[in-house]
Amino acid sequence: MNLLEVLRNRFQIVLENKVDDPSRYIAMVLPAQNAQFGDYQANCAMPLSKVLGKPPREIAADMIAEVDVSDLCEPPEIAGPGFINLKLKTDLLEQEFAEVFTSERLGVEAVKSPEKIVIDYSSPNVAKPMHVGHLRSTVIGDALYKILSFLGHDLTSDNHIGDWGTQFGMILYGYRNFVDQEAYEKEPVAELSRLYRLVNKLSEYHTTVETLPGLEWKLSETEQAVNAAEAEFEQDDKQGKKQLKKLRSDLESIRQSVTKAESLIAEIEQDEIYGPLAAAHPNIHTDARLETSKLHAGDAENRKLWDEFLPACLDVMNVIYNRLHINFDYSLGESFYQPQLADVVEELKTKGLAEESQKAMCVFLPDFKAPFIVQKQDGAFTYATTDLATIRYRVEKLEATSILYVVDARQGEHFQMLFGTARRWGYENLNLQHVSFGTVMGQDGKPFKTRSGDTVGLGDLLDEAISRALAIITSNDEAKPNGPELDETERKQIAEIVGLGGIKYADLHHNRESDYIFDWDKMLSMTGDTATYMQYAYARVCGIFRKADVERKDIRQRDDVPIRLAHEAERALGLQLLRFSEALSATAQDLKPNLLTNYLFETANSFSTFYDRCPVAKENDEAVRISRLKLCDVTARTLKQGLNLLGIETSERM
């Protein structure tokens, strides 16, 4: 039973007789923040006061008189200006806990109306090694896939890999002009990645050289505009003051752009390697795009090279996924949709959605200044075209009713335009959602990079996490009072579980919409809100059964001993375990895994308090001991299930 949902349903009956739209007020029935105020609180009397024109305490009293919770709660109490405190009956908790104890799903019911959801996550460019920037999409997407599936939705995961974009044009150009054949034969993906970075850097140089004069002209024009505005400015002219402030801001932005451009040009021209290469390849930025166009047009030689490059790239990518224990139902890349793109554009034209503008085919949306380009001037299709084809395929072939895109927040405008176009195209009943996330930052507050300034490779990151975890586990094991308990193989196995779990949890326990600072010490700490703390709590519970010389499966057969939540700490832990269903529902509703990590952290803390205050193995009263062992068993199962839904493994020994 989802106790919060049941209570909200009871209050909904009352609220429907008071206001036209009770949904806002129903959401104000919440778990109590402090146990001294009960288990739940209804905080809707204060905002209802303005609507109903009555004092909040009077409204609260009316609601208490009308709401039927006598089978669930002790008599409700009014506190402060109008809070309604609700304390669940202990015998109800014991009854509900007994059902959870015998439930394989820990009392979590499947949703009544399951959706067919396609979730799009990870989606790296295959010609480049995966790096820390791919971490968030991958672990957030995998966690949401597992959680929504567990709740009964019909999930399909799709890794929409970048295997056809402009990066391949750069690689093709680089392969023909700069390849180190020996390096390519030894480590093809590393060499292709080097070629991409080289061509990208040289292309950026030539593009910057071309755009700098325009920036300098714009700088001069803006300087003149600022000077003129300053000359005419009068102190009491509010509108003029506002315009001058904007002009100065624009001027500073343009100056920074010019400085950045000049710095990039100087860096390349002064470099003994890049300088000569840039001079020898003056058209590299256009020639690389031409290679992309040739590939898309079916050029035999480019297609042959693409077929040669792709398998090795996919193999390297899959090594990372295997290490992270992440699988996909589909990995349909951009190339899969290439044959469908011309038809998409034609259909948009036929429906009057796409029109020609400056020789490109564009969709103009009312809320956006820039067009949504579906075909470039040179005839090449865009990411927008591919994304539209993807939507059509997912609806027609995968029968999706919802599509979730777990993608960086910086792509927000693209998805707003994509969804707007899709709705006008005929998919107005399809639920499209951008599950956005922030950036992984270093200790300096900038995007996380190596000391040399390079992007941190995801494989290197996982190696480092496991290495650090092994050092901690070895140190802790050797410091045990009775000597080490783990052999070298066990230490390495646990280190992998702890290291990978630490990486995932460090990401997932932050609000996905926020940036977060990557911190090795916090990530693998055995105290605080970390995977290690949660994994240790699970191992600690398993250790209780070993010390008591009791098998957990035997405890589950003790139907003769009822659950008792007489002690305050027993009751608090029992209630916390009953809230697992609430935590999963909230996580699914907001698509935020940190709501589940918050719950698991609170559960581990609640268990710690219980274990400190309530003897288990040493309890003399057998009925109390068995009841407490049942509490321990459900705690272990809840922690394990919760962590597994986050893609994190556990170990019975740490």
Image (cartoon, rainbow, N blue to C red):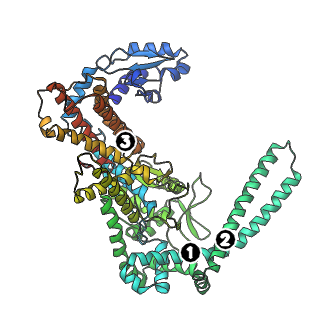
Q: Tell which of 586 and 464 is nearer to you.
A: 464
Q: How much space separates mark 1 and mark 2, taking CA atoms?
A: 13 Å
Give the image location of residue 419, x and y in percent.
48, 53
Give the image location of residue 8, x and y in percent.
38, 27
Q: Tell which of 629 and 208 is nearer to you.
A: 629
User: Which image quarter: residue 239?
Assistant: top right
Looking at numbered disc 1 in the image, what kind of residue is underneath it?
Lys
Give the image location of residue 43, x and y in percent.
46, 24
Give the image location of residue 259, x and y in percent.
70, 67
Q: Which residue is mark 1?
A: 201
Q: Which residue is mark 3?
A: 596
Residue shown at 77% from the left, 47% from the top: 242
* Residue 159 appears anywhere in the view: no
Left or right: residue 74 compared with residue 80: left
Q: Give the mark, 1 or 3, whose residue is nearer the N terminus.
A: 1
Q: Which residue is mark 2?
A: 263
- Tags 1 and 2 in contact by the CB under 8 Å rule? no
Label 1's element?
Answer: helix
Residue 283 lies, with reference to residue 495, above or below; the image says: below
Residue shown at 25% from the left, 35% from the top: 107
User: Which image quarter: residue 395?
Assistant: bottom left
Looking at numbered disc 2 in the image, what kind of residue is underneath it?
Ser
